[in-house]
Each structure stands twice: as structure tokens, then as C-alpha cells.
Image (tube, helix red, strand yellow):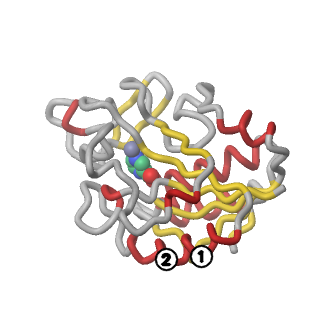
Amino acid sequence: MHALIVIDVQNDFCLGGALAVADGDSIVEGINTLMAEADCIVLTQDWHPAGHSSFASTHEGLEPFGTVEMPYGPQVLWPDHCIEGSIGARFHTLLEKDRAQMIVRKGFRSQVDSYSAFFENDKTTATGLHGYLQERGIKHLTLVGLATDFCVAYSALDGARLGYDVTVKEALCRAIDLDGSLNAARAQMREAGVTLA
Ligand code: VGL
Ligand code: ZN
């Protein structure tokens, strides 16, 4: 069985959003088309409390897109985004979200960020998605969404590590590309056996 995992297609990552990914809106139509043909559809939703530790504004004197050392390793600092219940945290208006069978929220613990749909950035706290997919007998994953080099890549790498056959459909992803992060993420995904289609 095959699952389509749609990563973080939310207002704050699209045009006019707090952490807008260039051209992010342009993938929505293609994702809708894919969803119309998929049997198992999961959406992820970045979902942070105000004052989250990944927000630059939480750390006095630090700026967005810098990094800070967290107990679990280096963490990029972001503008405030995807605050629980806000309009920015909602899915893109044109995304046919009613097709989804499962919505996974992540990043809701103040002290740890969560890029991956499977594990938070401490690499040990599970979101529960693996259990859900296992119970549904899923072996193959197709990943699309935002952003290629952060949440999509981390999800793909964890998925491969967990033993799934993972394909990232790059034409339906867009990247933040911070200091070469897109090239690095692509190399890591290839190395992990992820198919970049
Ligand atoms: C993301 C940065 C912070 C993403 C989420 O969806 O790629 N990036 N939170
Ligand atoms: Zn986030």
C-alpha cells in the first residue's frame, strides 16, 4: 500500500505568509490532482505555541535565519510562523484538505522543533505517524509540499530510516534554500536511498 504525505502546505509558507517559500503556492494544484488518485492521504501541519523555541523572537538579540544551540543540537531560528489556531497555520485555501484521512500536527512542544512528520528534532520524540502507517499496511511513501530542504527532507530521511520506500516528487515541492540547504538535503536524501522524482 502506498501513502501520499503532503507536508505543511499552510498559509505561512505561501505568498504573503510569515515564512513564505518562493513560489510555494504554485504546487497546490498539482497536489490536488495527486490527492484525487491516492488511497491513503496524510497532511502534516506545522503547529507552534506562541513563544516557541524555534522563533528568533523568543531569543533576545538573535535574528531569524541564525542558529542557536539546543540540547538536541543546532536549531535554525525562524520568524514567528504557524502559531496554533492562527490564519497562517491554516492550510492553503485551495488545498483540497477534505480529502485527507489523517492530519499530523507537529512542533507543538515549546522546547523542541519538529521538521519531520515522524520525529521531532530531538530525533526520539515520535509524532505517531509511523504507527498509523504501519497499521494501515503502508510500505511506499510519496512526499510533496513545503519546504523541500527542511520538513520534506527530514520526513523523507526518517521515512527511509524506518524502512519505507520513499519518493520525493520534487516538482511538487519548493525550497527555502538557506546557505546551500537544498543541495545538502538532496545529497542526503539520495544517499539514504530516497528517490528524487
Ligand atoms: C518548516 C521551518 C520551520 C517547513 C517548518 O515546513 O519546512 N521550515 N518550520
Ligand atoms: Zn515551524
In front of the other: 70 or 28: 28
Residue 174 vs 41, above or below: the answer is below
Could you classify mark 1 by the number of other residues whose Cα lies within 10 Å: few (under 14), some (14-19), or many (20 or more)? few
Q: Classify mark 1: helix, strand or loop.
A: helix
The x, y position of residue 150, in whole percent, is 49, 53
Q: Residue at x 58, y 59 (%)?
A: 99
Left or right of residue 12, residue 125 in this image: right
Q: Are marks 2 and 1 in contact (CB under 8 Å)?
A: yes
Name the residue carrying label 2. 29
In front of the other: 146 or 137: 137
Q: Classify mark 2: helix, strand or loop.
A: helix
The x, y position of residue 106, in whole percent, is 48, 37
Could you classify mark 2 by the number of other residues whose Cα lies within 10 Å: few (under 14), some (14-19), or many (20 or more)? some
Numbered circle sitting on residue 33: 1
Residue 51 vs 146, above or below: the answer is above
Left or right of residue 178, residue 191 in this image: right
Residue 90 vs 16, above or below: the answer is above
The x, y position of residue 157, in whole percent, is 67, 49
